[in-house]
Image (spheres, rainbow, N blue to C red):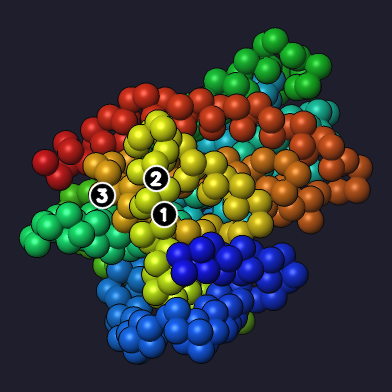
Amino acid sequence: MEYMSILMFIVVCGVLLLGFPVAYSLAGTAILFAGFGMLTGQFEQAYLNAVPSRLYGILTNQTLIAVPLFVFMGVALEKSKVAENLLNAMTQLFGQYRGGLAISVILVGALLAASTGIVGATVVTMGLLSLPTMLKQGYAPSFATGSICATGTLGQIIPPSIALVLLGDVLSSAYQRAQLNMGIFSPESVSVGDLFVGAIVPGAILVSLYLIYVVGVTWLQPHKVPRVAPEKSKITWPAFLGALLPPLLLIFLVLGAILGGFATPTEAAGVGAAGSLVLAVVQKQLSLAKLKDVMLTTTKVTSMVFLILIGASIFSLVFRGFGGEELIEHLFNQLPGGVFAAVLVVMLVIFVLGFILDFIEITFVVVPLVAPVLLAMGIDPIWLGIMIAVNLQTSFLTPPFGFALFYLRGVAPNSVQTTDIYKGVIPFIILQVMLLIGMAVWPSLVTWLPAVVYG
C-alpha cells in the first residue's frame, strides 16, 4: 500500500508536465487515487473527512494573510516606477566607471528583491530596464544577462520574501507535527519572522559574492566590460538620495518592525502595503487605473497561491493515508549516511523538481512530506528552511529549465542568444552552490542571528 503513495507522486508530476493547472492536478490525482484505494480496501475514508477542517484552517490562517499584502506591496512598487527611478539614479552615479552599471544592477536588484519578494517580477523588471542599456554600452551579452538573472532570483532569499512566508507556515506545522510524533506535547514553534532573520546573513553574503565576482570580471576579463569615458555625473546627491531613501525606508519599516518585535510578519506586511501606496502617491504615479491593475494582479496571484495550497492539502492527506510518510521515514532511516544523506537526497530531489515546479508547488507539496521526518532527526527548522530557499533559488537559475532564464528570455532582444544567457548564469550558480556548502558546513551562518535577536 505504501508504494501507492510513490505512484501517486509520479502520476501528479506527469500530469503537471502535460500542462494541466497545478491546483486541479494535485487535488484531482489525489481524489482519483483515494477513490481507487477505497474500492480496493487500501485507503480509509476518514482521511477525506479531515478535508473540510483543513480547508477552513487554510482560509483562517493568520500567517497566510501576509501573502496578499506582500504581493500588493511588490506590485504597487513595480507600477510606481520606484525601481526605474532608482536604477536611473544608480546608473548616472556609477555608470561612468568600468563595471559600474553591473554593480548598479546588483544593488538595485537586491533592493527590489527586498521590496517585491517575487522572482519573476524582479527578473522581468531588471531585464526591461537595464539589459538594453548594458548591451548598448558594450557589455558582453552573457555577462549582462547572467548578472540580471542572478540578481532577479535574490527575491527568493532576501526578506520579506513570499517564498519565506510560505515556507515559514509549512515548516511551522511540520515542526510541531515532528515534535508530537517524538512525544513532545508542548512543542516549540518556528515563525516566518525566524526565517526572515535567518535569511539576512546568507542574503548579504550572496550579494557580496555577486559584487566580488563583478569586480573580478572587470579587472580580469576587461573584454566583457566596456571602458566608459569618464564624465561628470548628471545627478546630484539630493536627487540620488530622493530615489534611494524611499524604498530603503519602506524596507526598514517592514523588517525593522519584525526584527524589533513590534509587529508580526502579517502586520508588517500591512505596513508595507500601505507604505507602497504612499510612495506611489508621493511620486505621482498612482491613478485609479493603476490602482485597479494592482488590485487585480494581487487578487490573481493570491487566488493562485491559495488554490494550490488547497490542492496540496488534499494531496498530502491522501499521501499520508496511503502510508507515504512512514515510507519516507523508513527510507531515510535506511540511508547509509544518516542525517547527512537524508538532507542531501531531499536537496537533490527539490533541486530537480525546481526545473518543472514553481516554488509554491514545491513548498506545499514536497516540503510537508519530507520536513517532519527531517526535523524529527534533529535538524534545525530555520536552517532547513533557508537551505531549501537557496536550493530553489539555484534551481531556478540552472540551465536549461530554470524559471529565471525563461523570464529573461521573454523580454531580452533577439540579438541575445539563449546560449548567452546559459553561459552567463554559470558563475553565479557556482557562487550559490558555494553558499549552500558554506551553510551546510557552518550552520551558524543561518542560526546565529535568530539566536541573537530572539534569544
Category of crowding for the residue at label 3, using alpha-carbon neighbours closer than 10 angstroms: few (below 14), some (14–19), many (at least 20): some
Q: CA distance from mark 3 to mark 1?
A: 12 Å
**Secondary structure beneath label 2:** helix
Q: Amino acid at mark 1?
A: Ile
Residue at 48% across / 74% down in the picture?
315
Q: Position of residue 156 (x, y in %)?
A: 50, 49
Q: Amino acid at mark 3?
A: Ala
**Secondary structure beneath label 3:** helix
Contact between labelled residues 1 and 3, with CB atoms less than 8 Å apart:
no
Q: Which residue position is annotated with label 1?
A: 328
Q: Which residue position is annotated with label 3?
A: 376
Front one among 218 and 335: 335
Residue at 75% across / 44% down in the picture?
400
Q: Is residue 428 above or below residue 327?
A: above
Q: Quadrant of residue 454?
A: top left
- Circle on res. 332: 2
Q: CA distance from mark 2 to mark 3?
A: 11 Å
Mark 2 vs 3, N-terminal side: 2
Mark 3 vs 1, N-terminal side: 1
Front one among 258 and 406: 406
